Image: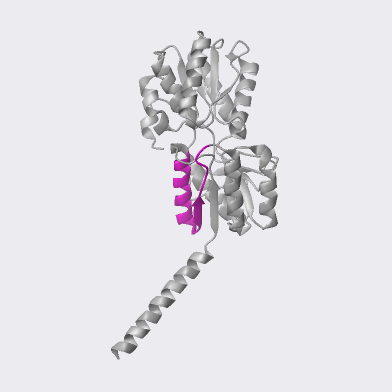
Amino acid sequence: MLSQFKKVLAASALSLVVATAAHAADKHKVAFVPQLIGIPYFNAMEAGGNRAAKDLGVDFIYSGPVDTNPVDQLQIVQNLIDQGVEAISVSVLDASSIAPVVESAKAKGIKLFTSDSDAPDSGRAVYVAQATDEGLGTTIIDELVKRVGEDATIGIVSGEATASNLNAWIGFMQKEAAAKYPKLKLLAPQFAGGTAERAAQISGDLMAANPDIKAIIAVASSTCPGVAQAIETAGKIGSVIGAGYCSPNTARSYLKSGAFGFTVLWDPEQLGYLTVWAGKQLIDGKAFEAENKIAGLDKPVTYDAAKGILLLGPPAVFTKDNVDKFNF
């Protein structure tokens, strides 16, 4: 009797394992490939993706390059396509080279879309946008002019020269300056890749070469610490203002030291959540509505069908006075 009971118990356990494995195999997979792993911004997107995966009952795959290398990023995307991951999102490093990968995904029935950084001419399924490129570009210029005046000299330190989102923001900065502040002098953008060290070096050189410089904009989150540290090291707090697209946690100490006057961003945790939600919608073949109320997000998300853009919302401005209200 005991022997028979053990056999029944073992069979039941085996059935449970098989059922669990079958259930796991049935779960849809949504992937996100960031521009760079290991920085607070994309860590927050990963956290949001994990939260959404739990809420929506999907598997979330987070995989990206260790530095901002477009070739490495595209190889990761292709590997995910080869594995049959059903929906793959990418924060695009090089918009000019991703179209063939999009076609490769379509050939296998895989939904490839962009998030955080777009490639609008690639044929991607949708772009999950944190805020409009125009809103981000104009906000940072308008906020700086409040602090340094309409005739100041301003430096720009960006990340990779091929990053479409960063270049779009810079383009709208330049457009806003030309349209509203004709006396404002925006220096030619300098590109630091993905390293804070290089950003610090460039920022130091900008201040040395332009004694009248009043502000430096850190366009990539990875360049924010470098810009701020260069201002601190040069003893320019109070005479040169740092600003940029940096998470509150990255910028907090620099906002409080005065090296940064403000930072413009959004909540990347919620952007990560929206990315996985969008992937699940694409897999399920569900259309996006003009306004989408999503249980895991604070506010409704709008969809521009003509441009194929899901918009998280307007940008936020973080200062020393409100930065401690946020943790990302």
Task: Kindly give the residue lying farthest to the left in the view shown.
Answer: 2
Q: Which residue is pictured at 38% across the width and 37% down the height?
A: 327
> Which quadrant holds residue 240?
top left
Which quarter of the figure is the C terminus placed in?
top left
Give residue 30's quadrant in the image: bottom right
| Residue 115 screen position, x and y as percent | 57, 42
> Does residue 108 sit above or below 66 in this rendering?
below
**Residue at the far bottom in the pictured view:** 1
Inspect this view and state whether residue 288 appears: no
Q: Taking the image as drawn, is residue 35 in sight?
A: yes
Q: Is residue 204 left or right of residue 306?
A: left
Residue drawn 60% across the image and 25% down it:
170
Q: For residue 322, which quarter of the picture?
A: top left
Examine the rendered structure and indicate whether residue 117 appears above or below residue 203: below
Residue located 58% across and 58% down the image: 83
Which residues fall within the magenta stretch? 42-67
- Is the residue 274 above or below the residue 240 in the image? below
Image location of residue 300, percent across then percent down:
53, 44
Where does the image place residue 116, in percent across and percent down from the top left? 56, 39
Between 215 and 35, the one nearer to me in the picture:
35
Residue farthest top in this picture: 211
> Which quadrant does the N terminus fall into?
bottom left
Exactly how many numbered labels are in the figure?
A: 0
Q: Is residue 213 above or below residue 223?
A: above
Residue 133 on the magenta segment? no
In the foreground, 251 or 325 = 251
Could you say which is closer to the camera, residue 174 or residue 10?
Answer: 10
Q: How is the image coloured?
A: one colour
Q: Position of residue 149 (x, y in %)?
A: 52, 12
